Image (cartoon, rainbow, N blue to C red):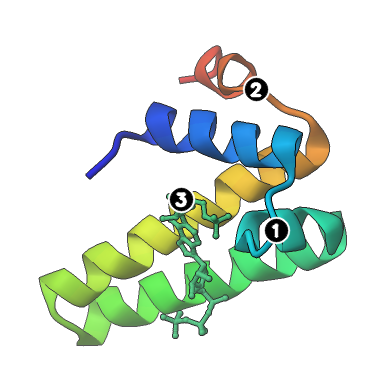
Amino acid sequence: MKTFDELFAELSERAHTKPEGSGTVAALEAGVHAQGKKVLEEAGEVWIAAEHESDERLSEEISQLLYRLQVLMLGRGLTLDDIYKYL
Ligand SMILES: N=c1c2ncn([C@@H]3O[C@H](COP(=O)(O)OP(=O)(O)OP(=O)(O)O)[C@@H](O)[C@H]3O)c2ncn1[C@@H]1O[C@H](COP(=O)(O)O)[C@@H](O)[C@H]1O
């Protein structure tokens, strides 16, 4: 189990060290257009799960959306503070 901040730190480290086999590295190399499409895809899955699926499936889809948002943040070079200042 990890927090939003801990996941962001982990993904930032992946972006920096580029370990072989990392899905995050591949997603970052795919570019912002592909990263944005993944955000939209996961958001749709969250919506569908919210209306038709279990709490567990919804929670899983939400976690994937958070992950995809973080990949997009890294793709654009944003930090957590860039987002948190608006919360
Ligand atoms: N939290 C995540 C995470 N959430 C989602 N995903 C990826 O996103 C995929 C799910 O979304 P996709 O829609 O692209 O794939 P899918 O096959 O359609 O899957 P479903 O939506 O149907 O479940 C997963 O199979 C993962 O590849 C994640 N990949 C990695 N992480 C975490 O990121 C960290 C770094 O991971 P690596 O870069 O792979 O080392 C680790 O702590 C991981 O746990």
Estimate the x, y position of residue 6 in percent, counting from the top left: 40, 30
Disc nearer the start of the sequence (1/2): 1
Q: Is residue 4 left or right of residue 54?
A: right
Kind of residue sitting beneath label 3: Leu
Kind of residue sitting beneath label 1: Glu
Question: Looking at the image, is 54 positioned above or below residue 39?
Answer: below
Q: Is residue 16 left or right of residue 11?
A: right
Pointer 2 residue Cβ closer than 8 Å to ligand 1: no
Residue under label 2, please give it: 79
Q: Secondary structure at mark 2?
A: loop
Q: What whole-number distance in Å separates the C-alpha atoms at marks 3 and 2?
A: 14 Å
Q: Quadrant of residue 73?
A: top right
Residue under label 1, please give it: 20
Pointer 3 residue Cβ closer than 8 Å to ligand 1: yes
Q: How many marks?
A: 3
Classify 10 Å Cα crowding around label 3: few (below 14), some (14-19), many (20 and above). Answer: some
Q: Residue at x 78, y 43 (%)?
A: 75
Residue under label 3, please give it: 66
Kind of residue sitting beneath label 2: Thr
Q: Is residue 44 left or right of residue 83?
A: left
Q: Residue at x 22, y 87 (%)?
A: 52
Q: Secondary structure at mark 1?
A: loop
Q: What whole-number distance in Å separates the C-alpha atoms at marks 3 and 1?
A: 23 Å
Q: Which mark is residue 39?
A: none
Estimate the x, y position of residue 46 in percent, counting from the top left: 38, 70
